[in-house]
């Protein structure tokens, strides 16, 4: 029917297509400050201890949550103070925080953990 036309296949590589399951701690998707997200972040393991990535809701509603931001996570791990400043008092940008936190295994191995989880379900 359309023999005189040349067909083209187009792939949709939209950034909205997920490379990790909902709630996976992906640094580039996280906010610098604490806040509500669409999905509650999953707890991770940091230095052999469970590390909570969400805070209890300030209004006390069980299903509500507040995800920790990069500033809170880094200060809890001792990388910077609660204001997001390094030891010299310099305010860190979101890119700086991501670069520092990316070295932690719970963030650097998100892809490997996702693959492992998928393989366990098969």
Image (cartoon, rainbow, N blue to C red):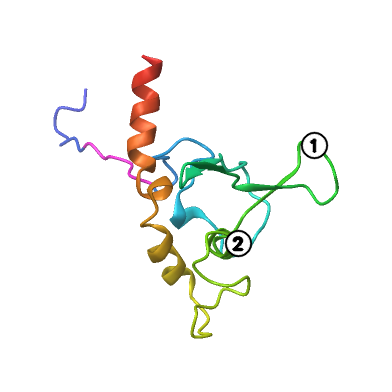
Crowd around label 2: few <14 · some 14–19 · many ≥20 (10 Å) = many
Q: Residue at the location (40% across, 26% down)?
A: 117
Total marks shown come to 2
Q: Residue at the location (59% across, 47% down)?
A: 53
Check the picture and name the quadrant holding the N terminus: top left
In what element is the residue under mark 2?
A: helix
Judge from the rendering whether residue 46 lies leftward or rightward of residue 12; answer left or right. Answer: right
Q: Which residue is mark 1?
A: 62
In the displayed structure, would residue 33 be above or below residue 11? below
Q: Residue 56 at x, y = what percent?
A: 75, 46
Q: Residue at the location (49% across, 46% down)?
A: 25
In what element is the residue under mark 1?
A: loop
Q: Whole-Å distance between the Cαs marked 1 and 2?
A: 22 Å
Q: Tell me which label, 1 or 2, sits earlier in the chain.
A: 1
Give the farthest residue toward the top. Answer: 122
- Residue 72: give its label: 2
- Taken as a whole, is the magenta stretch helix, strand or loop? loop
Q: Residue at the location (62% across, 75% down)?
A: 83
Q: Residue 63 at x, y = what percent?
A: 76, 36
Name the residue nearer the viewer: 48 or 27: 48
Query: What span is in magenta?
Result: 9-14
Judge from the rendering whether residue 36 lies leftward or rightward of residue 47; answer left or right. Answer: right
């Amino acid at each position: 029917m359309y023999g005189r036309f040349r067909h083209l296949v187009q792939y949709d590589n939209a950034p909205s297509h997920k490379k990790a399951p909902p709630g996976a701690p992906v640094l580039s998707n996280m906010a610098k400050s604490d806040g509500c997200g669409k999905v509650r972040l999953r707890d991770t393991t940091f230095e052999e201890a469970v590390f909570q990535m969400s805070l209890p809701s300030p209004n006390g509603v069980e299903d509500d949550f507040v995800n920790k931001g990069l500033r809170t996570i880094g200060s809890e791990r001792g990388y910077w103070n609660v204001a997001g400043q390094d030891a010299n008092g310099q305010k860190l940008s979101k890119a700086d925080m991501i670069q520092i936190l990316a070295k932690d295994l719970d963030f650097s191995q998100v892809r490997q953990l996702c693959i492992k989880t998928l393989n366990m379900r098969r």
